[in-house]
Amino acid sequence: MRKIVISGNWKMFKTQAESEDFLRGFLPTLEETPHDREVVLCVPFTDLNVLSKNLHGSRIHLGAQNVHWEESGAYTGEISAPMLTEIGVRYVIVGHSERRQFFGETDQTVNLRLKAAQRNGLTPILCVGETKKQRDTGETELVISEQIKKDLVDVDQENLVIAYEPIWAIGTGDTCECLEANRVIGLIRKQLSNPNVPIQYGGSVKPNNIDEIMEQPEIDGVLVGGASLEPASFTRIVNFK
Ligand SMILES: O=C[C@H](O)COP(=O)(O)O
């Protein structure tokens, strides 16, 4: 039985004060949320500690947006898995397209980060996806299958979430057709040795398309950027029908 995982990715948004404001609006609404789904908030490093304290006893799981592959060392600007787990972090996004595009993340470093996360008991959310150009030239399947193959070398598939995020759909309002997202996610699943890995869709997920997305049989959840920043829209998303 595959787990349903609904994750918010705040990217580089929200100060600590703003994250506390969000929780004041969002936490009470969770009482109505069905228990068949896991709710995760992946927030900036500076917000992790304050959220960890405020989330104590709630059903929200805390997530980070990056993790280094060493436990400690001279790596200015990086953060290690033990530093995250110490404050109650359970999930970490690895290989988001914004990291690959703007910060030189490669399949090799993604692979190292995935293994470090798992070694320390974190559940990584591995992001894969094709560019508009790759889609237009018919390379989607090849690009995704290469990313999965290279990123998952020696990675434990028992403690893993994958997010299929077509890059052209991120932050554009140009959501991937549900049937197409379902098809690509089905192809990803065929490549895995563990058929129970939850696979999310990400890219312009909003209150008005969440129900249709979650009706697709291969889609086990969503990774939400912009619409996770407001309590009202994220509440509607976690309460998909
Ligand atoms: O990690 C989240 C994705 O990049 C999607 O962002 P978005 O929902 O703002 O399109």
Image: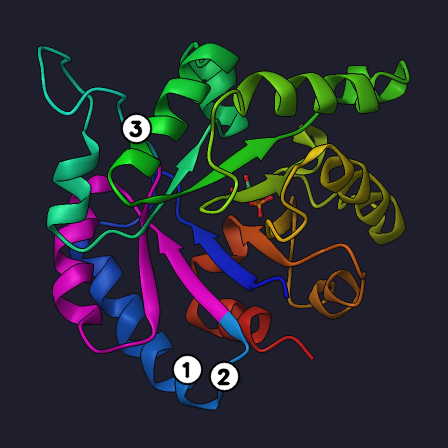
- Please state if 169 lies on the left or on the right of 49 as rendered: right
Circle 1: element type: helix
Numbered disc in front, either 3 or 1: 3
Asked if residue 40 lies in the magenta stretch, the reply is yes
Residue topped by disc 2: 33
Task: Look at 81% across and 61% down and name the residue there.
Answer: 216
The Cα–Cα distance between marks 1 and 2, rounded to whole angstroms, is 5 Å
* Vertical relation: 157 (above or below) 239: above
Label 1 Cα neighbours within 10 Å, binned few <14 / some 14-19 / many ≥20: some
Task: Look at 18% across and 42% down and name the residue there.
Answer: 84
On the image, which quarter does residue 137 sit in?
Answer: top right
- Please state if 37 lies on the left or on the right of 71 as rendered: right
Q: Are marks 3 and 1 in contact (CB under 8 Å)?
A: no
Q: Quadrant of ligand 1?
A: top right
Q: Residue furthest bottom?
A: 32
- What residue span does the magenta drawing correspond to? 38-65
- Please state if 236 lies on the left or on the right of 218 as rendered: left
Q: Are marks 1 and 2 in contact (CB under 8 Å)?
A: yes
Question: What's the amino acid at mark 2?
Answer: Thr
Residue topped by disc 3: 116
On the image, which quarter does residue 144 sit in?
Answer: top right
Residue 221 in picture, x, y percent from top left: 61, 59
> Is ligand 1 less than 8 Å from the beta carbon at label 3?
no
Residue topped by disc 1: 30
Between residue 233 and residue 157, name the one nearer to us. Answer: 157
